[in-house]
């Protein structure tokens, strides 16, 4: 009889890595900006797209915090699809290689306006420090510069939206061939 | 029997290509793997046809012990098939863990790797019904920057360490005026 491992739901891969005093990982109280409308389920980007208040139009970059960070695989979820569907630029606070995985699927990202070097950094602490440095740099730019960058990347945003709309068909064709 | 969150089009293709014996969504049972064992046992056959497959959906976070090259879900899944003496090739693994094959290569005996290996589909974004439905329901929106007031948005659901770090960074750097932020604000089960 083989021993079977039962892990409690509280044991997550993410929880064994940050014992590094370069970052503050202490827990925080719940928080919500007033811009983010009550009653909107953050997880369902269609609600955001179709929300009567449509508050997503007030922002330029979605800082996507994926479900995992210190994880052996890119894990793209609905959180990353949200800015693509909403024509917004994005960064992914997720496993190393997440942007590379999107590139392999044909999506384009926002170099050089956004420094995406973080995506190839394996060490989780180094990676999140690089991410926060880039967020700080972006936030120091005037909002007019951010708006201008969005227009500069209009073709990329449109390409990503159209690609995502066709992605199911593309993947089904690939799967049909693979199987 | 179909109960996993797979898009209709993906399910249709998989059922056309294979004889799906049953569907198992790991996240529903990863608190107690004997439940998966019970399901697989219930569907065990003395002889399997070539196209018979257990469709295993692995789209949620796995648990990794430090320095262990495989997650506990994959470990337990392979152990179940080993204990029940069911060929690993009867597993059809649908996952968003890109590159998970290497875990199974650790877990399956070397003598079995070439002729008795699961079928893995790990390169799809759209197999999940939530992704598929949301994309199909979304409409093209104009690229209008006139109403942009914030540099960024950061919506974070349940508490995770990387989200703690990010939230604390925003707070300490006084970035909430530029980054509309929410963290763990209303959905206790949000992922």
Image (spheres, rainbow, N blue to C red):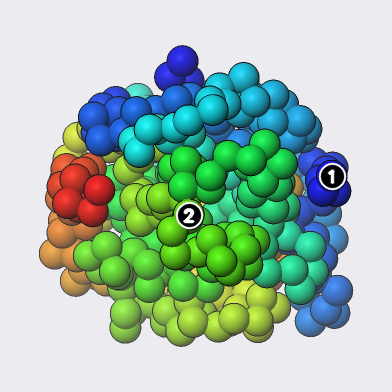
Q: Residue A12 at what x, y percent from top left?
A: 76, 53
Q: Residue A22 at what x, y percent from top left?
A: 79, 81
Q: Secondary structure at mark 2?
A: loop
Image check: B107 left or right of A14? left
Q: Residue at x 79, y 69 (%)?
A: B66
Out of A161 and B183, give the one closest to the viewer.
A161
Residues at marks 2 and 1, CA–CA distance in whole angstroms: 21 Å
**Labels 2 & 1 near each other (Cβ < 8 A):** no
Image check: B135 left or right of B143? right
Find residue B116 and name its label. Answer: 2
Q: Are marks 2 and 1 on the same chain?
A: no
Say above or below: A25 vs B81: below
Out of B111 and A65, give the one closest to the viewer.
B111
Residue B122 shows in this picture: yes
Instruction: Count residues near mark 2 (Cα–Cα under 10 Å), then give few for <14, some for 14-19, many for 20+.
Output: some
**Quadrant in which the C terminus of chain B is drawn:** top right
Q: How many marks?
A: 2
Subunit that carries the residue with mark 1? A
Say above or below: A143 vs B94: below
Residue B152 shows in this picture: no
Out of B86 and B187, give the one closest to the viewer.
B86
Q: Which residue is mark 1?
A: A1
The picture quadrant where one finds residue B107 is bottom right
Q: Secondary structure at mark 1?
A: loop
Image check: B41 left or right of A88? right
Say above or below: B109 vs A175: below
């Amino acid at each position: 009889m083989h021993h079977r491992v039962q892990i409690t739901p509280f044991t997550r891969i993410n929880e064994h890595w940050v014992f590094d005093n370069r970052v503050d990982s202490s827990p925080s109280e719940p928080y919500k900006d007033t811009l983010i409308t009550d009653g909107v389920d953050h997880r369902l980007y269609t609600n955001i797209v179709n929300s009567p208040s449509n508050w997503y139009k007030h922002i330029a970059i979605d800082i996507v915090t994926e479900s995992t960070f210190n994880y052996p695989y890119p894990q793209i979820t609905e959180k990353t699809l949200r800015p693509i569907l909403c024509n917004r630029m994005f960064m992914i606070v997720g496993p190393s290689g997440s942007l590379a995985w999107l590139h392999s699927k044909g999506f384009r990202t926002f170099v050089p306006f956004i420094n995406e070097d973080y995506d190839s950094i394996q060490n989780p602490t180094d990676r999140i420090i690089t991410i926060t440095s880039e967020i700080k740099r972006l936030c120091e730019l005037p909002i007019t510069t951010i708006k201008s960058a969005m227009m500069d990347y209009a073709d990329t945003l449109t390409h990503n939206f159209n690609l995502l709309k066709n992605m199911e068909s593309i993947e089904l064709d690939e799967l049909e061939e693979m199987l | 029997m179909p109960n996993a969150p797979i898009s209709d089009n993906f399910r249709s293709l998989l059922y056309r290509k294979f004889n799906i014996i049953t569907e198992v969504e790991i996240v529903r049972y990863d608190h107690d793997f004997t439940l998966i064992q019970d399901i697989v046992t219930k569907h065990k056959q003395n002889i399997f046809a070539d196209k018979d497959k257990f469709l295993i959906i692995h789209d949620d976070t796995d648990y990794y012990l430090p320095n262990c090259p495989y997650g506990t879900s994959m470990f337990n899944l392979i152990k179940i098939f080993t204990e029940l003496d069911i060929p690993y090739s009867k597993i059809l693994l649908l996952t968003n863990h890109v590159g998970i094959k290497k875990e199974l290569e650790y877990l399956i005996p070397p003598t079995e790797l070439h002729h008795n290996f699961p079928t893995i589909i790990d390169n799809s974004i759209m197999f999940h019904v939530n992704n598929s439905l949301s994309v199909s329901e979304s409409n093209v929106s104009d690229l209008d920057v006139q109403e942009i007031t914030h540099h960024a948005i950061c919506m974070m659901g349940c508490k995770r360490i990387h989200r703690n770090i990010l939230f604390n960074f925003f707070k300490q750097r006084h970035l909430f005026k530029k980054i509309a932020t929410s963290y763990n604000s209303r959905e206790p089960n949000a992922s």
